[in-house]
Image (spheres, coloured by chain):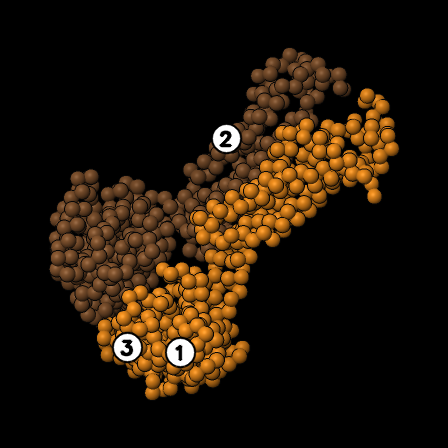
Amino acid sequence: MMRLPWRPILSALLRNRLPLTLIGLQIALTLAMICNVLFIVSERFALMQRASGMDEANTFTITTTAFGEHASITSIIAEDLRTLRSLPGVQSAAPIVSVPLDDDVSWTEDVYLGSDQQSPTSDDVAVYFTDDQGLATYGADLIAGRNFTAEEVGTRDADNDANKWPSSVIVTKALANHLFPNDEPIGKQFNFDKSEPSTIVGVIDRLQAPDPHHTNVSGDPDLVEYAILVPQVFYQTNSARYLIRTAAGRRDEVVAVATSALAAANAERTLENILTFSQIRTNAYRSDLAMMIILCIIVVALLLVTGLGIVGLANLWVSQRRTQIGVRRALGATRGEIVLHFLTENFLITSIGFAAGSLFTYGLNLWLMRQFHEPLLPLDYVLFGYVVMTLLGQIAVMGPAVSASHVAPATAARGA
Amino acid sequence: MLIVVGIGLGVSACMTSLTVLYLMGSDPLPTKSQRLHFVQIDNWDELDAYNSTGDPPNQLAYQDATSLFNTWKGGKQAVMYRFGLPIQVNDPGVHPFTAAGRATTADFFSLFDVPFQYGTAWDKALDGAHARVVVLDALANEKLFGGVDSVGRVVHFDNSDFTVVGVLGDWNPRVKYYDLDSGKLSRPESFYIPFSTAIERRLGVSKSFADTLLLSENKNFGLWVELDSPTALADYRSFLDAYVEEQHRLGRLTRPLNNRLYNVVELMQKRHVVSRDTEAQSGLSILFLAVCLLNAVGLMLAKFTRKSGEIGVRRALGASRNQIFVQHVIETGIVGFTGGLLGLALAEAGLWLIRLLYTDYARVASMNMSLMLATLAVSVLISVLAGLYPCWRASLFEPAIQVKAQ
């Protein structure tokens, strides 16, 4: 094991204070940015991976608005559902208002435990209006209790202020745990604002809220997992919306068939907002994906620039110290030892940069926390950043180090 | 060469994100944006705040919007709300489609300097007359009538015929600043009808107008007022306070006085028009530029040190320190300029990528001439600044010593 001449390397570095400061600062800033940026990227990635609870591959929505003189939206809805449910390839169809991850249409309500409560136990909880086929159409898993019966399904006219909340509802597991922790939720009751209590008759495993980025006043991080299914067929003036679930793999073919079947059944209406759930998911996380791509590009560019900087500086030091290197070679140092010297020197610089860099890293993280509500950076990212910077430095300095090792011993004598 | 690349990368990252930041947040109506004010009062529940920041609800209830509009006589104003309806014409070749419409008063168009290519807005006298007239935007006119002068022609929606009185020209505000609560970056609406007509026909609005303290899903009403002097602004403030207090006495508005009168730019800031992501990207780009500059300083130092021989010879031949310094500063400036050109090319690519990734940023992610010139100027400036120290060091090389080292 060769003895590494730490002291001479260190003191040589400290004599060269300006370039050392420059490259050290560069490394520190790069470290700060890389750690935080990679953290943001991994966070967004985790966000986008969450399951919605729906059958994502085989569902699509259609919105229709009737405009005839004598349009009766309720009979149109009934007829449309009959048409849709009779189509080959359609597993089930249901009237809906909103869909997970589709924040264009989102209905939320505050939930109270008891009618004398002043503040809601949970505010801005997602509500899904649908009929008894809704559960099968969304594709959510029923893990306790039962689905709605056909008799329980009512209607809700958006233009009617006298709508009532139904006595039976289905909730997601996350909401049940939040409202009644450690308790059997089936049979328990809660209130919507200023209304009679509703009873939980079923619990589904998962169905996310329409707006995955929404935060409520109480700042509940699980808000996106809370949802309530309400057995009411919803319509607004002359508009209604349907969700259709097809047999596995037949979605794209059925979209076309369903659209023309509805158009043929009734021409006095528009058929719009025809979206597959895949499109809805893409739209929902479009800005998160964009942010991830942009940040990754910045990381790559950053590593490139810093790497090139290290190469440039190392080349300078090699050319400045040709004489020195020649002397050491003349005194018997091997090529390997010269290379190792430069590698060690770079390693020391990176470590000094890391020390300052850790401060910058958490400084940047604090700013991101304050301005953008990012969480605290976990230490593993800092360690990972250190490893990356060390590797980068070592790779960058390898070229100059090898060329330094090729300085012939003879040069020294002449230069002296 | 490396220096140019480094500067180019740093400049391009900055210019890409700062362009988006600037365009998104910039004043869409500089000639009069300060005079236009958006009215907000607090009609939320007595016991709960509307949200955690203490702000009142974003838009007004029908009763307040119309009372305030009808009572104030001190200048131009516009009350409005947005709705969607299927719209069709008498041409079987044109499919009906659902379009976004805005119910408003005649002064809306002059208030926001909206250009017309055919016809004009409806007469102000028609505002209260439930007239069935409509103004189309250029795109709707294209879809319905093939883009010709359709003034006098008929459009059919809500089971009635409406007569076209005007068609808008090219109106592409980057941000939909007159209604930031229904899609900040979306296009303006496709058609416009008088407010009273829409209300009478209950277009897009809940059938009952019972006084409601909780807005829940009820339609949103916006009220803009033009107040062209500080006295006018003060007058409106007292007018608004008096109104709220009167309503309080009548038992309606029970929350404490919490009015807002933001002008266009203030409202854009309050509604976070510039997205958080854009702000974060801008901050990170500036940091990236800092790294690139540090890099440039180091590389310049290295480059000049390697040239110490050449500089020494020139000093020996009589060049003064100043001459060396100036020469190198100019060289740095040229490097900065070249880096700027590279940065511009890369920024164009960057903005193309932004438009690809954020589909609704089409109007806020493109450079104009002044931004391009600014990029070049800034690039030269920061390169020169970064290079000041290395250039000064270069000018310090002594003649004699260098010659001996040869």
**Callout 3 secondary element:** loop
Residue A264 at least partly seen: no
Closer mark to the observer between disc 2 and disc 1: 1
Vertical placement of residue A243 versus A37, above or below: below
Which residue is painted at 70% across and 21% down in the image?
B309
Closer mark to the observer between disc 3 and disc 1: 3
Which residue is painted at 67% across and 26% down in the image?
B305
- Residue A134, image x and y in percent? 41, 79
Closer mark to the observer between disc 2 and disc 3: 3
Viewer-proximal residue among B251 and B279: B251
Q: Is residue B144 left or right of residue A391?
A: left
Residue linked to disc 3: A196
- Residue B256, image x and y in percent? 21, 54
What chain is tagged by disc 1?
A: A
The part of the image, by quadrant, that contains residue B199 is bottom left
Give the colour chain B carries in the figure. Answer: brown
The part of the image, by quadrant, that contains residue B88 is bottom left
Vertical placement of residue B22 versus A266, above or below: above
Q: Which chain is orange?
A: A
What chain is tagged by disc 3?
A: A
How dense is the environment of label 3, judged by Cα within 10 Å: few (below 14), some, or many (20 and up)? some
**Mark 2 residue type:** Leu
Residue linked to disc 2: B381
Residue A41 at least partly seen: yes
How dense is the environment of label 1, judged by Cα within 10 Å: few (below 14), some, or many (20 and up)? many
**Callout 1 secondary element:** strand
Which disc number belongs to residue A170? 1
